[in-house]
Amino acid sequence: MTSTPYETRTLRVALLGHGAVGSEVARLLIRDADELAQRVGARLELVGVAVSRARADRETPFDPALLTTDAMGLVTRGDIDVVIELIGGIEPARSLVLAALESGASVVTGNKALLAEDGATLFAAAEKAGRDLYYEAAVAGAIPIVRPLRESLAGDHVRRVLGIVNGTTNFILDAMTTTGQGFDEALAEAQRLGFAEADPTADVEGFDAASKAAILASLAFHTRVTIDDVHREGITGVTAEHIRSADDMGCVVKLLAICDQSEDGVSVAARVHPVMIPKDHPLASVRGAYNAVFVESESAGQLMFYGPGAGGAPTASAVLGDLLSVARNRLLEVSGPAERTHARREVLGIGDARTRYHIALDVDDKAGVLSSVALAFAENEVSISAVRQEGHGDDAQLVVITHTATDAALSHTVRQLRDLPMVRDVSSVMRVEGEGL
Ligand SMILES: NC(=O)C1=CN([C@@H]2O[C@H](COP(=O)(O)OP(=O)(O)OC[C@H]3O[C@@H](n4cnc5c(N)ncnc54)[C@H](O)[C@@H]3O)[C@@H](O)[C@H]2O)C=CC1
Ligand SMILES: N[C@@H](CC=O)C(=O)O
Ligand code: NA
């Protein structure tokens, strides 16, 4: 059998969304058309670009006649081989992805919100249609992490996935830590640089990181974890005082996603919240919009994935990587790995999570306070690792660092502390990761 030269084969690509990521994908598809054709073995022809509003002044590297505001008409026209969904959000993205698969197209998406909310429906539709649903861009931008979990580590037993998976919040926390920049100013800069979601509440309230945690946990533990299963706290409650307090302890504040499996392998959990980590911890040196993900597995041991986690160009790299994979699959008439959630492990809530805590208490500056506070911890079996007093008189504050305890025990302790007459306020509770404090 003789093979057809790539020049004679064409795969038709439809792009949905021409924002920070979509415009960069279009630019690279046009600029690198010949090289990509060589790599795939077929030309990738951009046949339509769906936008929300037609704008006469829009500059495009492709024929403006390809622009359409009818995204559904584009994905269902019947001759599309691959749809790239870069609109974001739940609807109309979900309907468009489902229609694309039903119409026989493979789909590449960066839409973590949609995958974490309703991945089950999308993966089922892809399997039914015998088409691909690839989503490397959905987690940690340019960093290859979906494919390693889905393919490279498919024969291993992943125990834990932990990391910084939101560029916008890391950018903000880094700016607050290193330059003392205010929250709003740093967020505006992240938006200008194309890191933030269309609604940045998704970033700063932790929804984006929680979506990514759900995707990572589902892949790692072969168990369906949705965004509703993920405990979520964002960074809007992180103050300059938290950052100063962390600095006093030789720590920085980071927003982490933590997915782990119980020792007996029966249950899993996923959570997103700010933590204090020691400055010599590898995650402490992740700056700006960079992301880093640690994976711990039985045979491979510890792996670290690091790189740009947001932004048009880095994310376009992940999208194009997926596009080439699904294009090759189309030519071979095969499809890539389907979703595997057979393990059906129980997904635990935050109460069972075990971690360490940093608690700051505004207290009366008098004898007996320390013993009453220590007793509240002891009664809940939360062991104290260190305690120190800051300030005197009306400014007296106790800072307590605990050993590992469950979140339920810690919450109970905090409630009890709030009821103590000499405790004026529990001014902050933050989890601590890493050793050496
Ligand atoms: N910006 C980033 O750093 C990253 C983004 N992503 C994901 O990639 C996707 C796109 O993100 P961005 O490009 O940053 O968003 P964006 O907001 O810059 O672009 C989205 C575009 O879709 C268009 N759009 C909205 N509704 C539409 C409709 N019904 N039909 C056609 N077009 C429509 C909007 O007008 C906008 O131009 C999202 O799912 C996001 O979560 C993933 C990783 C990183
Ligand atoms: N808004 C997201 C974009 C990438 O996923 C982020 O800031 O990380
Ligand atoms: Na990625």
Image (cartoon, rainbow, N blue to C red):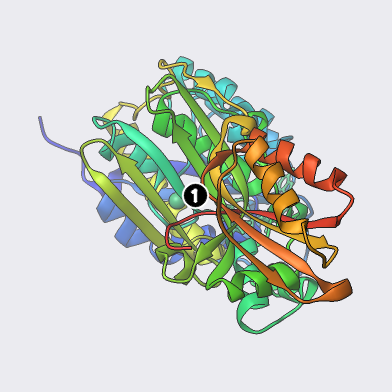
Residue at figure coordinates x 34%, y 30% from the top left = 336
Looking at this view, is 225 or 390 the one in front?
390
Please state if 372 lies on the left or on the right of 220 as rendered: right
For badge 1, the amino acid type reads Ala
The answer to whether 123 is drawn above or below residue 375 in the figure is above
In the current view of this chain or complex, which residue is farthest to the left?
A: 1
> Looking at the image, is 428 positioned above or below residue 94?
below
Residue at 61% x, 66% y: name it.
60
In which quarter of the view is residue 11 placed?
top left
Q: Quadrant of the N terminus?
A: top left
| Residue 138 visible, this angle | no
Q: Residues within 10 Å of mark 1 (few under 14, many from 20)?
A: many
Q: Which residue, as the protein is rendered here, is positioned at the far bottom?
A: 179
Asked whether 131 or 172 is in front, the reply is 172
In the rendered image, residue 189, in percent from the top left (x then y), is placed at 70, 75
Horizontal side of residue 103 vs 190, given as left or right: left
Q: Nearer the viewer, residue 36 or 226?
A: 226
Residue 325 at what x, y percent from top left?
34, 42
Q: Is residue 186 above or below residue 54?
A: below
Q: Which residue is mark 1?
A: 137
Q: Residue at x 35, y 39 (%)?
A: 149
Q: Is residue 314 visible?
A: yes
Q: Is residue 433 above or below residue 14?
A: below
Q: Position of residue 202 (x, y in %)?
A: 72, 50
Label 1 within 8 A of ligand 1 by Cβ: yes
Q: Position of residue 210 (x, y in %)?
A: 62, 42
**Ligand 2 found in image quarter:** bottom right
Q: Is residue 300 left or right of residue 192?
A: left
